[in-house]
Amino acid sequence: MSATAELLLQTAQRGELHHAILCYGPNAATLREVALRIAKTLNCLNGTEGDDCTACRRIEQRMHPDVHFIEVTAERKMISVEQIREMVAAATLRPYEGRNKVFIIDPAHALSVGGSNSLLKTLEEPAGDTTFILLTRSPDLLLPTIRSRCQPVFIGGEVETNDALAASIVASLTRFSDDRDTAALLGIAALVAAQDDCSDAVALLGQVLCDAVAGRVPLSIDRDRLLAAADATTNAIRWLTVNADARMLVEQALAELVT
């Protein structure tokens, strides 16, 4: 675990943690691990940063009544206003058996506009025994009013990658770079849209484009065009949360390499 994450846990152990933490970084699994460790630290029966006590085991198993996970449900692509209203109601109650109620919102960039607005007042005036942990790879996708009420903490870690997909993207970008074959870009859009998790696939495309900007992927494409395409992938991820067509969004992002 990174030094930043360890410092965060130590702050939680001292009881000095900010009531709303925005943890962001490239690896979603690492962010979730840190959130669980914070929840354990705040509620561990032995006062540690997480051990094998009953409370810590129940948190790990998602069975602790004071640790809540607000996530995208199977039938939706966003965290609904109803989910946030239920969370806000639960946040007004005293802890059932722990010292602190913990609400983990994952991923926070999937909050609907209504859900974000419902969360604002609670973030401004939380109960003293309540902690909110928002997780996201891309904090810029959150409303500025949400970000301003949280303490941002960058959690480093290895970027989650699909090596086969990354290799295919690089190969197609190289083909476009060498031959200016726009069919290669259309092929990338079709490939990304076909992935089970389009958001992660688009994020990976954005990472490859950023690597190209930094010179880690050698491409004969203007740097400003690469930057514009990388920025467009961020916007594409935002639109994916409202069920926009993934293939069209990627095609539009990659068009920045041509125009």
Image (tube, grey):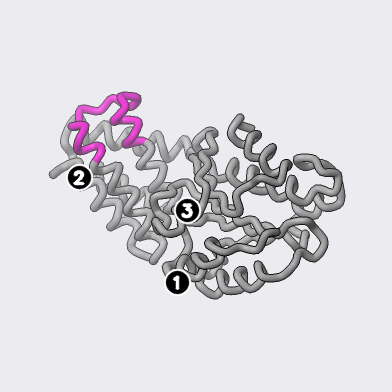
Q: Which comes sooner in the sequence, label 2 or label 3?
A: 3
Q: Secondary structure at mark 3?
A: loop
Residue type for callout 1: Gly
- How many numbered marks, from 0 up? 3
From the viewer's perspective, is 210 left or right of 106? Answer: left
Please name which of the two marks, 2 or 3, marks the residue nearer to the observer.
2
In the rendered image, the vertical position of residue 218 relative to residue 158, given as above or below: above
Q: Earlier in the sequence, mark 2 or mark 1?
A: 1
Residue at the disc numbered 2: 256
User: Can residue 77 be seen?
Assistant: no
250 sits to left or right of 117:
left
Query: Above or below — where is 62 with respect to 204?
Result: below
Q: Secondary structure at mark 1?
A: helix
Specify few, some or many for label 3: CA neighbours under 10 Å numbering under 14, 14-19, or 20 or more: few
Indicate which label's residue lies in the foreground, 2 or 1.
1
Q: Residue at label 3? A: 197
**Which of the pair 84/7 is nearer the observer?**
7
- In the figure, 170 relative to 67: above or below? above
Amino acid on which disc 2 is placed = Glu
Quadrant showing the C terminus: top left
The residue shown at (25%, 38%) is 227
Read off the magenta span.
208-227
- The residue at which mark 1 appears reads as 114
Q: Position of residue 143 (x, y in %)?
A: 40, 58
First reached walking from the N terminus: tag 1 or tag 3: 1
> Which residue shows up at 69% across the image and 44% down it?
12
Q: Is residue 153 visible?
A: yes
Task: Give the class, few, some or many, for how many residues have Cα within 10 Å of label 1's Cα (few <14, many ≥20).
Answer: some
The answer to whether residue 74 is above or below residue 15 is: below
Choose top left, top right, bottom left or bottom right for residue 13: top right
